[in-house]
Amino acid sequence: MIDQPTPSVTLNDLCKELKLDPRDARMMLRLAAKKKAEFPNLAKEHAPRQPWEWEAGSKGLAEARKALTASPSAG
């Protein structure tokens, strides 16, 4: 049996889904990753200077979606 790679979701995929500008989305994710109490998995799963990418269905992906859909005035 051949191991198939785990499907991943990139920042570009999320931007298309949520109709966001990638530059704005990266900024929002960087700010969210600093809020370790609110987004613990987002901070853990992303390495600095690496592309934003998550395994499909991961907690980090759920937190990224939450961070990108949060109201700007909420933070």
Image: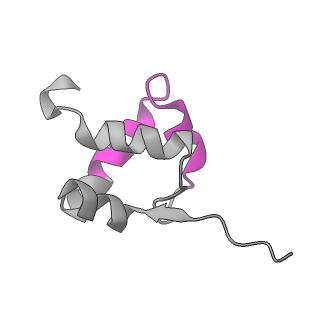
Q: Residue at x 86, y 75 (%)?
A: 1
41 versus 52 height, above or below: above
Q: Which residues are magenta?
A: 27-47
- Whole-percent x, y for residue 10 in the image: 43, 64
Quadrant of the rendered structure where residue 73 is?
top left
Residue projecting furthest to the front: 1
Q: Residue at x 28, y 46 (%)?
A: 28
Please identify the dominant SS of the magenta region.
Answer: helix
30 versus 22 height, above or below: above
Q: In the rendered view, does 33 fall on the left or right side of 67?
A: right
35 versus 49 height, above or below: above
Q: How is the image coloured?
A: one colour
Tell me, yes or no, if residue 46 can be seen here.
yes
Tell me, yes or no, if residue 43 can be seen here.
no
- Total marks shown come to 0
Asked whether residue 64 is drawn in magenta, I would say: no
Closest to the observer: 9 or 2? 2
Asked whether residue 30 is drawn in magenta, I would say: yes
